[in-house]
């Protein structure tokens, strides 16, 4: 028997393949295509205290081997998530990780507390993932995830208020992601997700306008994978907490690059759009690879990168 | 899984220099599509293009699954979950498309024998009409409306607009399925020169007035029964409308039907990444909030759209 289960803080994952926030809805959208019991964890679409309308369209545009999105964090709000979506997710024997965000430190804290309270009351949420790629309006639109000082403040505040395992999803739009990961770790994060999308832009040359209504968007898909692998590798060298690797994973081999570079788990995002069963196929592929390599425990593989 | 499968391309032939018809075949059990539903089709075998593209189903031949006493447990389960769902044991699907961008260019290169990943049928499709109805097609929008016309043969007053004669793709097939066909082209190479929505407006106005003059019927197609008695014509102004075409056409149509108290359904188009309701890339603003074109649509009550 090959062991592919991994631990992220107090979470036990059957396999290291999670869904990436924003690409898997609230789980039910893909339940027709994937047995949700077979996932390592389900990370749901980013939640805020109040429902959010998001950006005008066009919100997405395909680019070579990738796509830009500027959805604008549209979501139904934490209350509706707890009342309408969580009961469905509770049926499955798979940890649910609630991704959340706010526009101020206070909003982050209140969102985290609301999620923790809901979980304490009736279960169903097993960890929190903080999206810190939002601007801090109070601090003059500094993005929480790109300024170490504001990041330290918001992660520290949420850590103090939240009793669920706390994962911080790092922005790649920084000079030294290893340093940012260290800041998250020192502020009390239990794990980090690496990476969020990379800011990009596409221009409609006939209309001389940006293609996206929001002008810029987040680039995802295989186009960003080498950047993500490099960043995961850097973060793994910088911190001791578990690292969840993501960015353009389309196949099991892609996921293996992240694991070997040091990621304890991986998240699959854009691949679900092109193949709704990608998550499960990748988990199966990892298991197959281990059998081929004669490995019995995935921990033999994680961080096994040889230095030259 | 009924809605995600790998089919075989059985044909991909040009209809004329603008349009092609893709045929695919799947031997296993999948869901029989309804007119107005769509499929997400793989358009290449590399990461560029990366995403599947949505295409309305143009036609299908589905041999129905076994008799009810033979049908498997899973298909029964599926039926009880959604009683409108029917399963086919073997399906041929056809998609009419126009080569426009990277995705359709990739699709155009597929050959018989190639494999193609398919997600679908997705979306809601057109609600069934109670009697006669008006169909408004703009260009390739006919791809979505034609199976609807064929399902409800000789019930539609079809208004079909395109840029030129050559772009009135499948005109004969559509005309045969419709009671009556009205045509416009932007360049006047067929039918009346102008916008199809103006003709719809004229038709509705005339029938409101009880006029028996339908001056807009194309010469080519007026052999059917072009002079209608005025009682029938009066009735036309209350028929439901079904439309598919470019956004400016639908927007103009929304204006035409505004305040007339008629039902008007429009099939919308948006860029989609997933097609299953997860990515929220394809939302449209409605008077009751954001709706996903792929999930709550693509067919919407036109009056609901906040243009």
Image (cartoon, coloured by chain):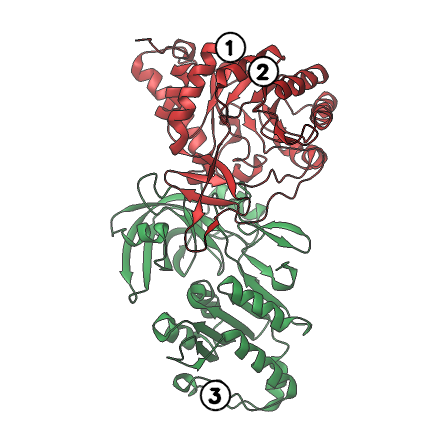
Chain colours: A red, B green
In this picture, residue A64 sits left or right of residue B33: left
Chain containing the residue with disc 1: A
Q: Quadrant of residue A67?
A: top left
CA–CA distance in space, label 1 to label 2: 9 Å
Q: Looking at the image, is mark 1 or mark 3 nearer the viewer?
A: 1
Q: Secondary structure at mark 3?
A: loop
Q: Position of residue B140 (x, y in %)?
A: 42, 64
Pointer 2 residue: A184
Residue B43 in sight from this viewpoint: yes
Q: Quadrant of the N terminus of chain B?
A: top left
Q: Position of residue A42 (x, y in %)?
A: 55, 28
Query: Label 2 crowding class (10 Å Cα cut-off): few <14, some 14-19, many 20+?
Result: many
Q: Secondary structure at mark 2?
A: helix
Q: Is residue A93 above or below residue A303?
A: below
Pointer 3 residue: B225
In this picture, residue B59 sits left or right of residue A49: left
CA–CA distance in space, label 1 to label 3: 79 Å
Query: Label 1 crowding class (10 Å Cα cut-off): few <14, some 14-19, many 20+?
Result: many
Residue A75 numbered tag: none
Q: Quadrant of residue A112?
A: top right
Pointer 1 residue: A239
Chain containing the residue with disc 3: B
Q: Mark 1 or mark 2, which has the lower sequence index?
A: 2
Q: Are marks 1 and 2 on the same chain?
A: yes
Q: CB atoms at circles 1 and 2 under 8 Å apart?
A: yes
CA–CA distance in space, label 2 to label 3: 76 Å
């Amino acid at each position: 028997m090959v062991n592919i289960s991994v631990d992220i803080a107090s979470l036990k994952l059957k396999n290291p393949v999670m869904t990436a926030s924003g690409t898997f809805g609230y789980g039910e959208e893909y339940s027709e295509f994937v047995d949700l019991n077979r996932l390592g964890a389900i990370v749901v679409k980013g939640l805020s205290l109040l429902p959010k309308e998001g950006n005008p369209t066009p919100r997405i545009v395909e680019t070579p081997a990738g796509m830009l999105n500027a959805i604008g964090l549209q979501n139904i709000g934490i209350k509706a998530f707890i009342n309408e979506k969580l009961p469905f997710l509770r049926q499955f024997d798979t940890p649910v990780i609630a991704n959340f965000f706010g526009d101020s430190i206070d909003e982050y804290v209140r969102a985290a507390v609301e999620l923790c309270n809901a979980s304490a009351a009736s279960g169903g949420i097993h960890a929190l993932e903080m999206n810190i790629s939002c601007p801090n309006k109070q601090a003059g639109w500094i993005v929480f995830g790109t300024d170490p000082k504001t990041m330290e403040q918001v992660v520290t505040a949420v850590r103090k208020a939240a009793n669920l395992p706390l994962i911080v999803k790092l922005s790649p739009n920084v000079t030294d992601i290893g340093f940012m990961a260290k800041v998250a770790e020192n502020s009390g994060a239990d794990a980090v997700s690496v990476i969020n999308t990379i800011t990009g832009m596409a221009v409609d040359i006939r209309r001389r306008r940006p293609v996206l209504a929001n002008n810029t968007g987040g680039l995802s898909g295989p186009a960003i994978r080498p950047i993500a692998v490099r960043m995961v590798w850097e973060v793994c060298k910088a911190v001791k907490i578990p690292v969840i690797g993501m960015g353009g994973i389309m196949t099991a081999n892609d996921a293996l690059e992240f694991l070997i570079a040091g990621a304890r788990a991986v998240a699959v995002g854009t691949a679900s759009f092109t193949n709704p069963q990608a998550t499960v196929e990748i988990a199966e592929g990892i298991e197959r690879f281990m059998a081929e390599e004669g490995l019995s425990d995935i921990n033999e593989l994680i961080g096994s990168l040889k230095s030259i | 899984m009924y809605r995600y499968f790998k089919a075989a391309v059985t044909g991909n032939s040009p209809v004329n220099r603008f349009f092609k018809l893709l045929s695919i075949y799947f031997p296993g059990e999948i869901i029989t599509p309804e007119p107005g539903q769509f499929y997400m089709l793989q358009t290449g075998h590399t990461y560029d293009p990366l995403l599947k593209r949505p295409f309305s189903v143009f036609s299908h031949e589905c041999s129905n699954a076994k008799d009810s006493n033979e049908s498997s447990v899973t298909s029964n389960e599926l039926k009880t979950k959604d009683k409108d769902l029917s399963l086919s044991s073997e399906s041929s699907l056809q998609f009419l498309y126009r080569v426009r961008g990277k995705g359709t260019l990739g699709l155009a290169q597929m050959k018989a024998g190639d494999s193609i990943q398919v997600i679908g049928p997705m979306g809601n499709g057109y609600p069934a009409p109670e009697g006669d109805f008006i169909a408004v097609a703009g260009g390739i929008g006919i791809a979505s409306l034609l199976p609807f016309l064929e399902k409800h043969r000789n019930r539609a007053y079809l208004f079909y607009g395109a840029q030129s004669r050559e772009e009135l793709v499948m005109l004969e097939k559509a005309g045969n399925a419709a009671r009556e066909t009205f045509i416009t082209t932007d360049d006047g190479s067929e039918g009346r020169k102008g916008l199809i929505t103006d003709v719809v407006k004229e038709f509705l106005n005339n029938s409101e007035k009880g006029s028996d003059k339908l001056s807009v019927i194309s010469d080519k197609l007026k052999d059917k029964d072009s002079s209608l008695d005025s009682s029938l014509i009066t009735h036309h102004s209350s028929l439901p409308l079904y439309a598919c075409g470019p956004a400016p056409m639908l927007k103009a149509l929304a204006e035409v039907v505004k305040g007339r108290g008629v039902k008007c359904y429009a099939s919308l188009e948006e860029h989609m990444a997933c097609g299953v309701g997860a990515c929220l890339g394809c939302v449209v603003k409605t008077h009751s909030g954001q709706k996903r074109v792929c999930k709550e649509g693509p067919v919407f009550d036109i009056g609901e759209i906040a243009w």
